[in-house]
Image (tube, rainbow, N blue to C red):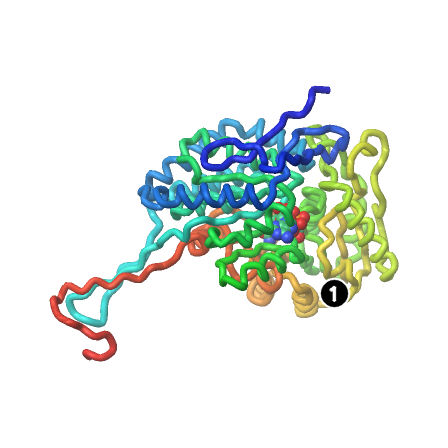
Amino acid sequence: MNAPAVYQNYMGGRWAEPSEGATFENLNPAACHERLGIFPRSGAKDVVAAVAAAAEASKTWRLVPAPKRGEILFCAAQLLTARKEELARDMTREMGKVLEEARGDVQEAIDMTFYMAGEGRRLFGQTTTSELPNKFCMSVRSPIGVCGLITPWNFPMAIPAWKIMPALICGNTVVLKPAEDTPLSAWNLVKILEASGLPPGVVNLVFGYGPEAGAPLVRSPGVGAVSFTGSCEVGRDVAQACAGSFKRLCLEMGGKNVILVMEDANLDLALDGAVWGAFGTAGQRCTASSRIVVHKAVYREFTERLVRRAASLKLGNGLDPSVQVGPLINEAQLRAVEGYVEIGKTEGARLLCGGHRATEGELGRGWFYAPTVFADCEPGMRIAHEEIFGPVVSVIPCNHLDQAIEIANGVLYGLSSSIYTRDVNKAFRAMRDLETGIFYVNAPTIGAETHLPFGGMKQTGNGHREASTAALDFYSEWKSVYIDYSDRLQRAQIDT
Ligand code: NAD
C-alpha cells in the first residue's frame, strides 16, 4: 500500500507545517487499517498565526463589493459541482457514510455556495421613513471581522460550507478547525476555495484536536464570532469560553428527534421514513429519527415491520452501491453505542433486533454496529431521551396525539420532529405544539434544505439559525443609519 499523503494547514494563502511538527492519522472507519492521510496536529501557535492572517485579510475583504465576493463563491460552487463524485468518494472513505449520502453532503455544500453567491447581490437591509421631515433612515449589514468555525465529522463538507459561505458573503474572513475524524473533506473544500480566486487569508484552515486547536480559536481575542456545531458537552465549554468577552456565538448541538406515527398514517410511508430517518448515516445525524412514538392501534404491526426492515439492511463499505448502512465513525463511538444498548436492556426496554457489533467477514475490519430496535420504551428511559448517535431507535407506544406530543416534548433537545398522519387537523396541531426548530409532515426528521433556517430549540442551540438568510443575521451586524438633510437640528421624540 502507498504511503499516505501528508497534508498541511492553510493560512495567509500559504500551505504550512504545524509549528510543533506533530501530526495525526486520518483512518477509514470501514477498514481501520487504511490510512488516508497524515494531518497537522496544530496548537495555539498555529491558531494565533491563522487568526492574524485572517485579521490582515479582513482589512481589504470587507471592502470588496459583495457581488464580487459572490462571483468567487459562484466559481467555487461550479468547481464543487464538477468534482462532486471524487469529493463524495473521499468523504465515504474517511467518514463511512454510503456514497449516495456522501454525494448528498457535497450537494448540500454546492447548494449553500450557490445560494450565498446569490446573496452577494441582495444582502438586503431596510429603507424606511423617519418621524422627522427631511430625514432618511436605513439599516445596512456590516461584517464582524474574523469568524472562528468549529465543525463535527458527520457532515464533513456540508457543515463547513454552511458556515464559511455566509461568513464570506457578509465580508468576514474565517479560520476553520474541522473535526479530527474528517480532515480530508475540509481540505478538499478549502482547496476549491483557493482555486476559485479567494484572496490570501480570507479562508484559513487549522487541523487538530479540539482542546489543542479548537479551544485556542474560541478564546482568541482576534476572533469576533464563533460558530460551533457538535456535542452539547463541548458546546457548553465553548459557550463558557465566549461568555467572558460576550463573543457572538452560534451553537448547533445534539438532538433526540421524534417521529409520531398516528393511527391513520400510511404505514408503508411511515416505515420508509422511519428506516431512512433512524438508520441513514448509521444514525449519526443530528436530525436522526432516534425515537418513534406510535399509536397503540398500529403499534404492533408497525414495530414488527420495522424490525424486519432493520434486520434486512445491508452493512458494509459505503463505496459498494448495494450497501445501505456504513460504519460508525470510530471506536469511541462504537463503545458509546454499546454502552447505551446495555443501559436500554437494564432499563427494561425490549430489544427486538441488533444490539451487537457486526463483525462477519469484512465488517470485522471496521466499526460496524447492527441496526437496533428497542420497543416498549418508557419516555423516562435514558435510551428514550439521551442522544445515542448510532443505529439505535427507541419505539414508544402512545394512546392519542396529545400524549404523543407530551412525550415528544419531554426531552432537553429541540431539533427536529415529524408526524405521519392523513388528518390535516392532527398535522397542524403537531406543527404548532412540537418544540423543535424543524418539523415535517409525512416525512422523517431528516432532509433539511439550505434556503430554510436550520437549527433547534431548547438545549440543541442558543437561538441562532444556520442556512437561509437567517445565517446572514449571525454573520453580520446591523447598522442603523439616519441621514438628516433638513439643515437644522432635529430631535427625535422631542420635536413632535
Ligand atoms: P464534538 O463536540 O466532539 O466535536 C465537535 C468539534 O468540536 C470538533 O471539531 C472537535 O475537535 C471540537 N472540539 C472538541 N473539544 C473542543 C474544545 N474544548 N474547544 C473547542 N473545540 C472543541 O462533536 P462530534 O462528535 O464531532 O459531533 C457529533 C455531535 O454533533 C452530536 O452531538 C450531533 O448531534 C452534533 N451535531 C449537531 C448538528 C446541528 O446542526 N445541530 C449537526 C451535526 C452534528
Residue 16: horizontal and vertical position, in percent? 54, 32
Figure disc tally: 1
Could you tell me if residue 40 is visible in this image?
yes
Residue 137: horizontal and vertical position, in percent? 25, 63
Residue under the image location 48 percent in, 52 percent down: 223
The residue positioned farthest toward the left in the image shown: 487
Q: Quadrant of the N terminus?
A: top right
From what the image shows, is residue 487 above or below residue 117? below
Asked which quadrant contains residue 323, the reply is top right
Q: Is mark 1 within 8 Å of ligand 1?
A: no
Residue 7: horizontal and vertical position, in percent? 60, 30
Residue 392: horizontal and vertical position, in percent? 76, 50
Q: Can you identify the residue that label 1 sits on?
A: 398
Q: In which quarter of the image is the C terminus?
A: bottom left
Residue under the image location 68 percent in, 52 percent down: 289
Q: Which amino acid does label 1 sit on?
A: Cys
Say which element carries label 1.
Answer: strand
Instruction: Looking at the picture, tell me which residue is in the foreground, 435 or 74.
Output: 74
Residue 422 as seen in the image, left or right of residue 407: left
From what the image shows, is residue 399 above or below residue 154? below
Residue 276 as seen in the image, left or right of residue 44: right
Could you tell me if residue 286 is visible in this image?
no
Instruction: Looking at the picture, tell me which residue is in the foreground, 416 or 338.
Output: 338
